[in-house]
Amino acid sequence: MKILIVASDKCGHFTPFIEEQAAALQAQGCEVLRLGITGHGAMGYLRSLPALKKCIREQQPDLIHAHYGLSCLLASMQRLVPVVSTYHGSDIHDSHILPLSRLAMRRSAWNIFVSKTALAIAQNVHILPSPVCLEKCSILPCGVNLSAVQKVGKVAARKHLHLPLAASLVLFAGAFDNAVKDAPLAKKALAELHEVQLIELKGYSRSEVFLLMQAADVLLLTSRSEGSPQVVKEAMACGCPIVSTDVGDVRELTAGIAGCYVASSREPLELAALLREAILFAKNGRTDGRQRLIEKGYTNDRIARQLMHIYTSARSSRS
């Protein structure tokens, strides 16, 4: 099967988890084509429609898999090739983008939501256009690759990254300047602790990210909204303790895992208390998050196999 992936261009490639999903699809025998979108805003994306149609004429894909609402809207503007659309969270939680995402949902052959929360918002009858048909929807988070670099250990990771061996290190789950991640809340929580260093997750290579997750005592996620945050699944793969606000599917993902905590509020004092527990837990070991990913089938090879079934259903729905 020949699959054309449509997503935002990130300096000549897609965001890492989309690239990793594409590689997993290739391992399943798919021929993967790519169309990266460099425009911004709805009109910036839609200006790529001629390039999309040209790619379809020249490459003759069997199916398009688009990621994020505006790419999904663009892909659905042509009717020659069936479209599978994946919505990752920001395209659902943003009130300006959601109506455009819902328009794409109605035009797509199949819609994938990364969490139950995202699907519930998409199905809200008070939002126009009208809700999508549940018969052509799936809940399927993006997967992760499990690798040796995720198991190097805290001491080795800190030595490699030149981080202090004895310090308490909290890894902030994103860039400080990303408003959705709410860095001010994280900093207020850290202000309640003593001698704890907050590390911004920005500007690191893929392998360095996994080393940071090995080196850190805890990953802190203070987002205002999420779909199925990839950073949490990656931290789980590294056995890194997690403290998070109650967003996306984090509570479901981490339920029952010792060393992982989901706050019941957005109060800095509660987050600080949970951070103390997570740091104390980290002194004695790592979490069983990696095993949870395996049990739930959230590895890229297994997600790719599920995608293959969805692709077959999407093509059948258009025949």
Image (cartoon, helix red, strand yellow):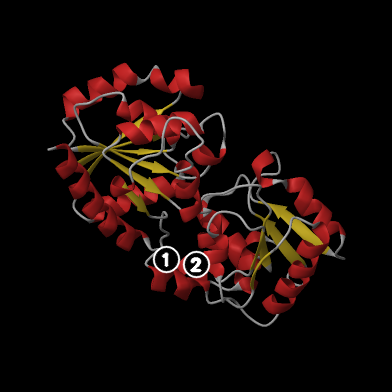
Q: Considering the image in quadrants, where does the N terminus appear?
A: top left
Q: How many residues crowd around disc 1 within 10 Å: few (fewer than 14), some, or many (20 or more)?
A: some
- Of all residues, the one furthest to the bottom in this rendering is 284
- Residue at the image point whose x is 64% and y is 75% from the top: 259
Q: Amino acid at mark 2?
A: Ala
- Residue at the image point whose x is 80% and y is 52% from the top: 187
Task: Indicate left or right for 29 with 158 as reference.
Answer: left
Measured as percent of width and height from the top left, residue 298 is found at 40, 63
Task: Indicate left or right for 274 with 8 as reference.
Answer: right
Measured as percent of width and height from the top left, residue 228 is found at 50, 54
Q: Amino acid at mark 1?
A: Leu
- The answer to which quarter of the image holds residue 75 is top left
Measured as percent of width and height from the top left, residue 200 is found at 69, 50
Residue 164 visible? The answer is no
Task: Indicate left or right for 309 with 77 as reference.
Answer: left
**Disc 1 and disc 2 in contact, CB within 8 angstroms:** yes
Residue 208 has which mark?
A: none
Q: How many residues crowd around disc 2 within 10 Å: few (fewer than 14), some, or many (20 or more)?
A: many
- Residue at the image point whose x is 40% and y is 69% from the top: 296
Q: Considering the image in quadrants, where does the C terminus appear?
A: top left
Q: Secondary structure at mark 1?
A: loop
Residue 230, relative to residue 74: is it above or below? below
- The answer to which quarter of the image holds residue 303 is bottom left
- The answer to which quarter of the image holds residue 130 is top left
Residue 53, relative to residue 21: is it above or below? above
Residue 25 vs residue 107, the one in the foreground: 107
Residue 99 visible? The answer is yes
Residue 146 has which mark?
A: 1
Q: Secondary structure at mark 2?
A: helix
Measured as percent of width and height from the top left, residue 312 is found at 18, 49
**Pointer 2 residue:** 237
